[in-house]
Image (tube, rainbow, N blue to C red):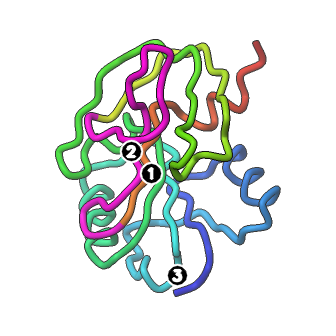
Amino acid sequence: MKLQIGLIGASLVWEQVCRQEGVPYKTIDLSAGLLNDTCSLIVVTRALTRDESELTQQYLRRGGAVIGFALYMTTLAGMSTHEQRLDYLVADEDGPFAGIHLMDLGIKGFIPREADQMRTQTNTRAIFAGPFGGGFAVILPFDVAAVLTDTR
């Protein structure tokens, strides 16, 4: 497996994040297959079609990893969300996001039912991070591109 991020759909924001972090990436076509051999992580940058969702589930079953906005990934494994205002998120001291002390958002979010990380202003969990569909997933309650390009 290559250490490379596969972007499902072009995203200037995710491309910039990858360049900033020094991680190789490429925009991928899920219908081409062989994702486990070419990508160590898939970033879901837009809503998945039914076929893309099935291919992503196959990738996960073979031990792949995905990250993306909950609304873009609702077709994966019957996931559901609930809408909530996200003024901010804070991390637990001992969780995987402990280095992120505060995320100031001020947006409408869509929290995955499975959320188990980071807390909102109402003390509810907002992010899912863990085993998912045979692989690993980080499911965010917001679209990273929208948050990083918010000019308010």
Residue shown at the point (60%, 13%) measured from the top left: 106
Residue shown at the point (56%, 36%) measured from the top left: 91
Magenta residue span: 113-135
SS for dot 2: strand
The relative height of residue 19 versus residue 125 in the rendered view (above or below) is below
What residue did someone put label 1 on? 138
Residue shown at the point (50%, 15%) measured from the top left: 121
Q: Residue furthest left?
A: 78
Q: Is residue 149 left or right of residue 85?
A: right
The relative height of residue 27 versus residue 120 in the rendered view (above or below) is below
The relative height of residue 17 versus residue 115 in the rendered view (above or below) is below
- Which label was assigned to residue 41? none
Residue 67 in the image, given as x and y percentages of width and height? 48, 53
Q: Is residue 111 left or right of residue 9?
A: left
Label 2 – label 3 distance at C-alpha: 25 Å
Q: Are marks 2 and 1 in contact (CB under 8 Å)?
A: yes
What residue did someone put label 2 on? 128
SS for dot 1: strand
Q: Are marks 2 and 3 in contact (CB under 8 Å)?
A: no
Q: Which sits earlier in the primary sequence, circle 2 or circle 1?
A: 2
Residue shown at the point (71%, 32%) measured from the top left: 148
SS for dot 3: helix
Label 3 – label 1 distance at C-alpha: 20 Å
Residue 82 in the image, given as x and y percentages of width and height? 29, 22
Residue 119 on the magenta segment: yes
Residue 46 in the image, given as x and y percentages of width and height? 47, 43
Q: Look at label 2 and name its amino acid.
A: Phe
What residue did someone put label 3 on? 38
Q: Residue furthest front?
A: 93
Category of crowding for the residue at label 1, using alpha-carbon neighbours closer than 10 angstroms: few (below 14), some (14–19), many (at least 20) = many
Label 2 – label 1 distance at C-alpha: 6 Å
